[in-house]
Amino acid sequence: MICMEFYATLGEPCARRDILDQMFQAGMTGIRVNLSHTSLTQCAPLLQELYWPSARGAGRGNAHLILDLQGPELRVGDLPRPILLREGDEVLLGDGGIPVPPSILQSARRGQEISIDDGALLLQVKRSSPSVLLCQVVRGGPLRSKKSLSLLGMEVDTPTLTPADLENLNQAGQCGATHILQPFVRGRRDIEILRDTLDSLGLGGVRIMAKIEEEQGLEHLDEIIRTADQVCVARGDLGNTMPLWKLPAIQKDIARRCRAAGTPFCLVTQLLWSMERRPVPTRAEVSDIYNGVLDGASSLMLTGETAAGRWPVHAMGYLVKTAQEAVKAM
């Protein structure tokens, strides 16, 4: 019998005991907390008063709690309200404009393309200075706080663990964390730094899930597979590093190499993306899930579908039932 894990992402739509109960009944086996948007201090009451009681009530005392660290990921800063970026308009990043990390200002030069929110928005740098970038909107839409940023085709040097990560890790044991999802893993050294930190906190039993999200991670994939407890094929940012039509082949290659090494892997990002807005998925989405399971995925993770969508229970049901059909075929 093949045992799979089915993860949701915690957010307002599922931050209710009755909804969590129904998600466990639908087959959920764990939940992800995205620490790029919150902290464990803020989430701890919700976990202790809702999530863990719901897990015990569903007979899942072994449910997983996955902490997705901020890590070296680059993000837009806090905005007082969403900003509508219109194609062709000029916008400022940095002083007097949209807040971004200093490393973006230091690294970007004229002509550089900047992807925001997993590629939903695209800017091109027209002029640069140490404190501000003048950009033109190539692909527009609403911009909200804390959305992901990446300089296409360029690697920005950032630390493995941020001060916020260390603060959250200090509370991970008290909150019952079972897994740490490490973003933008560039090589085995990133995993070793996290493992040493966990050991120093008495959390040696916590499992490390290494997100593959950029070129460096792909270049050092074999050593990452050998060092991590699990690999996570994070298709959002990974899809920003290459033409999207190349992404399926990369996903297949990661799956093949994980299978060969006996390292489990998780698929995440847009598995049921349309269910953020509608109660029924597309045919392409269920086919994607089915094929991912046939490729050997040991776990599947929903993100915005449960963190922001209106139908978190429906989404979990479709995820689990589709995967179970694939398991039957195996």
Image (cartoon, helix red, strand yellow):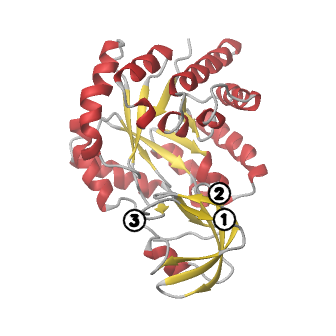
- What residue is shown with label 2? 119
Identify the residue at horizontal 62%, vertical 52% (top origin).
238
Sequence-wise first label, 3 or 1: 1
**Disc 3 versus disc 1: distance between alpha carbons?**
25 Å
**Residue toward you, 317 or 88:** 88
Q: In this view, does 78 lie above or below 50?
A: below
Sequence-wise first label, 2 or 3: 2
Q: Residue 159 — which label?
A: 3
Q: How crowded is mark 1: few (under 14 residues within 10 Å), some or many (20 or more)?
A: many
In which image quadrant can residue 290 be found? Answer: top right
Q: Tell whether label 1 touches label 2 (CB within 8 Å).
A: yes
85 sits left or right of 248 in the view = left
Quarter of the N terminus within the rendering: top right
- What residue is shown with label 1? 122
37 sits left or right of 326 in the view = left
Q: How crowded is mark 2: few (under 14 residues within 10 Å), some or many (20 or more)?
A: some
In which image quadrant can residue 314 be found? Answer: top right
Identify the residue at horizontal 41%, vertical 52% (top origin).
36
Identify the residue at horizontal 71%, vertical 58% (top origin).
242
* Kind of residue at disc 3: Pro
Q: Does residue 271 appear in this view? A: no
Q: Is mark 1 on a helix, strand or loop?
A: strand
18 sits left or right of 265 in the view = left
**Disc 2 versus disc 3: distance between alpha carbons?**
23 Å
The percent position of residue 141, horizontal first and vertical second, equals: 64, 59
In which image quadrant can residue 13 be found? Answer: top left
Q: How crowded is mark 3: few (under 14 residues within 10 Å), some or many (20 or more)?
A: few
